[in-house]
Structure formats: structure tokens, C-alpha cells
Amino acid sequence: MAVNGSHLLNVYRHRLIFQGHNAFKKLTYSPCKTLASFEHGHSLISGKGEGSLKKTPSPYHPHLGSPVLSSVRTSSTVALTSSRLTSLTRGPYSVVNDEDIQFFNKVLEGRVITDKDELESHNTDWLKTVKGNSQVLLRPKTTEEVSAIVKYCHDRYLAVVPQGGNTGLVGGSVPVFDEVIISTQLMNNIISINPVSGALICQAGCILETLDSHVQEHGLTMPLDLGAKGSCHIGGNVATNAGGIRLLRYGSLHGTVLGLEAVLPDGEIMDCLTPLRKDNTGYDLKQLFIGSEGTLGIITKVSILCPQKPNAVCVALLGCESFQKVLDIFVACKSHLGEIMSAFEFMDSQTMQLVKENLSMTSPLVDYPFYTLVECSGSNGTHDEEKLTKMLQAVMDDGAALDGTVATDSTKIYNIWALRESCASALMKDGYNYKYDVSLPLEHFYTLAEVMRERVKNHAIRTVAYGHVGDGNLHLNFTTAEYCPATMALIEPFIYDWVAKHRGSISAEHGLGFKKRQFIYHSKTPSAVALMATIKKAVDPRGIMNPYKVLPEVTNGENES
Amino acid sequence: MAVNGSHLLNVYRHRLIFQGHNAFKKLTYSPCKTLASFEHGHSLISGKGEGSLKKTPSPYHPHLGSPVLSSVRTSSTVALTSSRLTSLTRGPYSVVNDEDIQFFNKVLEGRVITDKDELESHNTDWLKTVKGNSQVLLRPKTTEEVSAIVKYCHDRYLAVVPQGGNTGLVGGSVPVFDEVIISTQLMNNIISINPVSGALICQAGCILETLDSHVQEHGLTMPLDLGAKGSCHIGGNVATNAGGIRLLRYGSLHGTVLGLEAVLPDGEIMDCLTPLRKDNTGYDLKQLFIGSEGTLGIITKVSILCPQKPNAVCVALLGCESFQKVLDIFVACKSHLGEIMSAFEFMDSQTMQLVKENLSMTSPLVDYPFYTLVECSGSNGTHDEEKLTKMLQAVMDDGAALDGTVATDSTKIYNIWALRESCASALMKDGYNYKYDVSLPLEHFYTLAEVMRERVKNHAIRTVAYGHVGDGNLHLNFTTAEYCPATMALIEPFIYDWVAKHRGSISAEHGLGFKKRQFIYHSKTPSAVALMATIKKAVDPRGIMNPYKVLPEVTNGENES
């Protein structure tokens, strides 16, 4: 009864380019040479194929302070948030003085940064849209050090902002005024890994990609993967409930984080760092910290469940004529691929145009209105290929897919993923980015892009849509050379109203941070927001922990983007 | 390169009994006739095989008020908790009066129960170990009705206890004194199901098994499954963060619950009932309610992600000579079965003896010290069978498994699962049950059973161990004819100390409820418990919501079991 996978693939070879079997003639993509020598270049997709992928330099990493990006916007050209939004009021916190610096130096010998130049990049967000004016950056190495400095700040009534890789997109990890920055940069020890249970325990400052490489040596994989993996810290991932491309397969961090340790706003250490998969003793406190964006405490250690590393990965890129066809392919994938589907992404034609124009990348397919990227990963490559073949047969037969290319070897897989994962960096080359990350019921999913494109018209260089269809998560982006209030006025609050009207979420995975907190009511009811405020007040009565973030400022309706 | 599954299965057929292919000669198990005519008989394992399973009567359902069980312990023979634990102090709540009943009757015409006989079973827990003395049971149908009565109770300072299917094992869903019982029994509407996204929205009183049947019609399955599925309510499942046999595959409710609606202790309705998979707008409040055992509010509606229903299910029961071999098989399963492993359970020989003796069940295998039950479910039966065959080849070759039987058709699968899932009911036939549900690192997993068996010796009728090895979750049980303080003194607090010393959790999935709350410090640090108390105080300042549960009574160290 078994269907011969190779046979079926041959049937479709006249239309599909099966990269693992054929020479990949159509694909001329090569890493962008001008960026190839980046000092910290990491692959964004190691972990998707074989280990050798890890050494491939990434041309499109969004967090490298690239010279190309800096030609458009630099930290020093970004206006201070506090001077740009004059109606914003600084909280009644103390101001850091010499005595404070002296104390910090006593606890953190040589790891207290007060140099203006060095502070610059820690004061500015990655998108270069918001900028704080902190005078001091602290780099603790241990939980006890974090506890000591937070307790001091609490008693001195100094506001603090926790910072991981500073790769967030909503201004949540930089100061708004002069908050003390507490960085997890030096808290990067891997503490233990249990290959049988899959539990990894590490400090919060470990870089996601480093962890992925580490657990792969034990036959495991990290349950999350995202574009910023070469820079982002696991503590920041957890604090922001990061999503990414593996969520479809392994679920959210609320399910995969087993335990954590955090320093509370009064300096108390909350140790819930269990490696156990099940523990129903009292409230699951770790959940409060997952996604609270550093407003309830500083995550110092994480225990996370790593799934078995797949033995085989294959990826298909398909072209189709409408978004409805993208959905048809999704339904076919759920049915045919079942448990092996590990990603289902889409890009519209404008997105493909973007990566071609801004990063000189080449698509293996000719132009189509829409592209879907389907990834399978499982324990048996032959089985997976057979399932994928059946799915492809179905979607080519009924016209859902017009063309496609399949990759089973790591370089080809890398090249296909590069198209999808380079979007964020490609956008930055246009200048100012207006980024929207929404969840929508699938029936309204792409309509928002059409509505907004029609509305914004030539007030943006481009309007591009891509995202995680499998999770109902649309990334909608607009670009202009510089920040343009007229464009912004066309976008907001209209876009949030539209999302709310269609029962979506105005922030699927980026969080609210500083920039989107005023829009919380578009996705949450007043009673829910009131309960959040009750919890914030109970856990952080002095309000020193990452102020001006997540929860809306009651008296200030000003747009903070 | 593909291995022929049937060929390999033939190779092992001299040792394995492959039930889907061969006559099942060794297996003489048949449903226990004395119990077959139960009025509410449900299958415990519908959803694991074909739909026809649903009609199979369950001989071992633990929640049917069975005549067999009632011959051992009835509700009326259970002593009132308040008279048994005299040092326990009733909170300063008001006492229900005629005016209150009048108000309740106004809101819930005909759904206010004050009849003593009818109240009896709602005052007593399923294990018949604790009993409250509530004078009134309320049965709302809508969220608004729940809100109205909770608001009234809040203002009148009346304590309440939310109750679902009353299938909990730690006395969390029955009153301790005279709390008003609010039952979700009549809140059983299925609101919507989206077959593409898999999101199910329903009221909290829907029975888990009913939901599973319903979503199966849409090609989906519930992400959780447990012995009490024929009685337990989804609201109770969420409130207690129920685990069960599918957790290994689909993860915990913290990951699969998409949203919920709850009535807060002041009657306010908190609507976080999103069907979206991703929503990072503010604190993820639903997480607070998952596992808080009704102490922070009453869950009224649930939105939950249902995975694709597997096309094929197969089950293997293997006999082995030591617990180490059970672990060896687990490692082999992770490697060979990967994404299709959906359960990995174990029973020791004493457990097999228990179900044979107390429920007249028959094992398809001869006696072994240990048994493992492995379930695979996936989208392609041929592929799954091939993977299972390879795994069996490996574990038979290296001697990890000494014998085994494999089932691919639904009746045979049912029969194998019946052995494992009947344990709880079989135990009840001995008399009083001392139930322990702990998580332990796998290296210490079975040692606890050995240590306790040696310690308790003939002070118990039997000491049996079974559970979810894949989740590190051990169910350890002792039985005596009646409650025996001497036996209890041998078990507690020794068992909790042992678990704490080995970094386990004293309650993996049952929760703390009333009976285990005093032992919270064995699994949680003082700072974590203090933070829980802070949250409880903030959300329920009057303390009316399920008092005497989860959080320890500060001044009372008395054992509450």
C-alpha cells in the first residue's frame, strides 16, 4: 500500500524543482557579499538541517548594527523619546547619583558602564525608533548580584529596565527616561541538560542560537526559533513570550518553559526553576513572568523542555494565485503532513520583491501573487518525503499550487528559509519601519493587508505582508525613508480598530512594550486590564520595574510609536 | 531504503502477539459483567481508536457511584471534615440565611438545591475522604448568573466553592465547612468549533468525553485525556491543570488553552476568551486561573486548541524485568518513534495483580516485574507501524523487553488501555486509598515505590505504582480497609520529605486542594508561596473564593488528609 515517494516526485518534477534530487538551476541566490564579513555573523537557520549549516554566514541578520543599516539611521540620529513625546511624564523616581554608582561598583566590580558612547546602543532600540537617556548600565553575572542591585534600586526608588539582546520591536527593553539598565549579557552559563527528559537549565543571558547548538549535541532542539536567534537572549525570549517559526510544532513558551528563577522588584529571589514536566503545587508563578516584558521582575534562569532533534527536514516553497489558495494548501498540509508539519509561512509578492530589491536575493520561482513555505521535520526522512509528496500531488492537482520547489539538503533548505527570514532586515534598508504584528482569524487574515495597501497608497515606499499562517499571525509592514507623521496618521489607529473589529490581537508575538501599550484596549477588556494593573501593583508596589511599559498610562492618550 | 513493517513484525511474531494481525489467543479479558449494565457507562478511551469505541461500556469508570464501591464507603459514612480536624478554624464568613436563599432563587429559578440528600454527594469528594456541610448548591446556566451570585456572595461575605464534575483527588472541589457550592453542571453548551484552526469554545461544564466526541466529528481530538473523562468538566480540568495520558504528546493546558472567561471573586466577568493562537497584549491572565483550583475565580468558558485527530493509533504492551529496562525502552521510543509517540505509561507487577484481583481483568502477557504501555498515533498508519516495528526490534534485540503484544484495532487497543486506566477504580475496591501523585527525576522515579513498600510493609493491603513515565509522573498508592492513622503515620510526611529531597514535586497533576496544601513547602520556596499569597490577596481580598484550599493555613500544621 505504500506510495513510492520518488515516483511521485518524478511525476511532478516537470513543475516542481526538487532541490535534493536535481541540480538547482533556477536558483541563483548567493549571500550578499557586502555583508558577508560581519564579525558576529550567525546562521539564522542552523538547527533546521544538518550541523554544517551552523557555519554558514548570515547575510540578513537583523541585529548586527550593520553598516548598511547605519547609513539610513544611527543611534545618534534617533531623538530622545522623552523629548519627542513631551506629554509623557517621568515617574517620581530618584535620579542616579555618585553614591549609587559607588554601590553598583562595589557589587559589580568593573561591570558598571557609564560611558556615553557605550550606553548609546543600550539606550536605543533595534528599530531605532525609541531612545532613552540612562546614565548607567549594569552587567551582573549571578542571580545574587541581580538581587543585590535590584534591592538597592528598590530601596533607593530607582527605576530599572531589564535588557537581554535588545532585539525587541516595541521598545520594551530600552529606557524611556533615565532608568538603570540591567543587562543579562554576562549571565550566559548553561547549567545542565538532561538528554533523557530534554530539560535544559541555563542563565537568562544565553543566546538562543548558542543554546540550540548546545542541545543539538545531545540530540535535542530548542522549541523556539526566530530571526533574531543570533542575538536574542533566552531570558528575553521568555520575558516577551517570543513566538517564531517553531510555535506551530512545539507550542508556545507557556507550554515549553518548565520553570524559571526571577528577581522580584524588591530584590527577593523567586526560585521556581524546576526541571520537572509536571508540578501542580500552587499557582504556576512562572506563567506570570512569561510575556510580562520585564515589568514584574527580572528573569535570571530558565528551565525549558527541548524536543527530540528531527532526523530529517524538508522544505517546500510553492507559488499560488490567491490567499485563498494559501489557505487551501494549509488545510491540505494539516491533513497530509499531520504531526510532521513544523512550519507554514507565507509571503506576498511585495515581500518577495522586497528581498530581491533590498538584499539582491533571488527566488527559485517565477513571480506569483503569493508564496507558501512549508517545512516538515520528523524522525524518518523517507516517511516524511512520502507524506510531503502526497500533499504536493494533492495541491498541484487541484490547482492550489501553481509551481513549487522542494529542498531536502541543508544548503537548499537554508536558501529557501533565507527568503522568508530576511524580510525584517530587508525592510530596514528602506528607512523607517512601521511594523505591525497581528493575529487574525484566518478568514480575515490577508484582507487587512489589502485594506491597508489601498488606504496608505503612495504614502509608503511599500506595504508588505508575510507571517505565520499556521498560527494566524500576520506581519504587516510599511516603510518610508524617514518617520512620516502623515503616513502614521493613515495607519494608526485605523489598523488597530480594524483588527479589534475582526476579533484579532494587535500584538501576536511582539508584545506591547512602550510603543503599543496605549492600544491594549483594542485586544483586552477593561476588566482584564484592571486585573493586570492589580497584579502589577501587588508584585511591584513601588512601580520601579520597567515602568512605562505594557500597561497603559492612564492620563496619556498620545501615540507613542 | 524503506523497511518492510510486516516483515519485521513477522520476525517477532514468535515472541510478540500482534493483535491487529493475529488471533489474540492469549488475551481472555472481557468486561466485568457485574458492572456492565451501569446506567452512565462510558468508554474511557474513545478517541484513541475508531469512533465505534465510543459505544463500548466502561467497566472501570471511577466516577459512577458504583454499587461495588458503595459497599465499601458511602457518602453518609464519611465523617465531616470540620468535626474530624477540630483544630481547623472556619473563616469569619457569614452563614447562609433565608434571605440569601430567596435571592438565589430569584436569580436561578428552580436551580437552588437545599435538599440534604441531594447535597450529600456534592459535599463529599469522590475518594470519600473529606466532607463539607454546605446547605446550598447553586446551578447557574450562564456567565451572567454566575456573576450575579458571586457578586452577591462577595457583598454578603459568603464563602463559595466552585464545583465541576467533582472528580478531584485532593478535596479541592467540595466545601470544608458550609461554603456555598456553585456547580457548572448546567453550563454545558458547546459554543463554536473552527475546524481549520482547531479552536473549540465551550462553557465550563462540558464533559471532557462529550467534547472529544464532538470535535472528532470535525477531524480533531481533545488535547487531554484522563480516566475521569466521562464525568469531569473542562472547566475543572483547566482549573486544576489536569494532565493525563496525552500530555506527553500535546503538552500541558498552559500551552493548549487559548483563552478563558472567568468570574472574579467580586463578581466581575473577566473575558479573555480568544480563539487566537497568539496574543501578546499584556499579562497572560488565563495562565493564573489554569491550576489555581478555583481559588482566584470561577472559570465559565474555555477556548482550547484541538489537534488534528490521528488517522491511525497503535499500542504495544511490553513486559520487562526491571525499571531500568522501562527507561531503556523509553529512550528507544524517543529515538525510533519521535513525533508519533503519544503515550508512555508503566505499571508494576503489583498494579497488574490489583486489576486482575479486584476487577477480574486478564493480562495478555504472563507475569513480569514491570509493564510498559506505548501508544503511537499519527497521520499514516503504515509509517507508524514501520516505526513501531523498528523500535520493537531494537528493544527485543537488546533484551529491554522480554515479551510484548501489539494492537492496531480499536477493540484490542481498548483492552490494553483498560488495564492501565482501571487502576484507580480497582484500588477503591480495597477500601481506603492513600493516593500520591508525584513528579520525580527519572533516575529516582521507581526508587520511591521500593522505599515506601519496604517502609509500609504489611500496614497496607497493597502498595502499587503506575504512571506516566514520559512525564516523570508516578502514581503511588497504598490501600487499607478503613482509614488507618498508623499507616498514614508511616507514609506522611516521610514520602513528601523523600520527594523534596530528590527534587521532585509532591503533586504532579492532582493539585493541592484541601488535603495537600500544608505540604506546599516541600515543592515550593517560601518566597514563591509568599508571592502566591500576595496574588491571592490582590485578586480575592475578602478571601471568599474556595477558602482553605491550595495555600497553607499559616497557624495550622495538622495533617489534613
Image (cartoon, coloured by chain):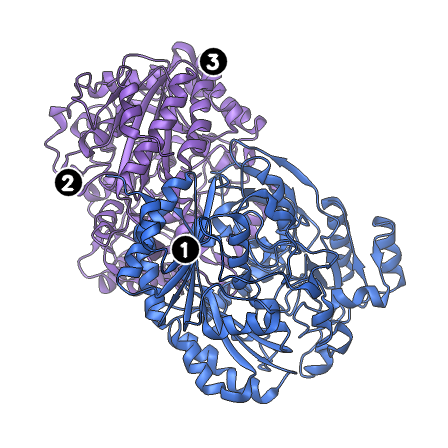
Chain colours: A blue, B purple
Image coordinates for residue B434, horizontal then vertical, percent? 38, 25
Inspect the image, locate mark 1, and give the three-letter code of the amino acid beneath it.
Gly
* Residue at point 49%, 87% (across, down): A457
Q: Which mark is residue B297?
A: 1
The chain identifier of the residue carrying mark 2 reads: B
* Residue at point 50%, 48% (across, down): A409
Q: Which mark is residue B52?
A: 2
Report the front residue among A50 and B132: A50
Q: Is residue A207 left or right of residue A421?
A: right
Give the Cα separation between the discs numbered 2 and 1.
38 Å
Q: Is residue B12 above or below residue A399?
A: above
Ranked by sequence position, the earlier of labels 2 and 1 is 2
Is residue B203 visible from the viewing direction of this image? Answer: no
* Mark 3 residue crowding within 10 angstroms, few (<14) / some (14–19) / many (20+): some
Q: Which residue is mark 3?
A: B455
Inspect the image, locate mark 2, and give the three-letter code of the amino acid beneath it.
Ser
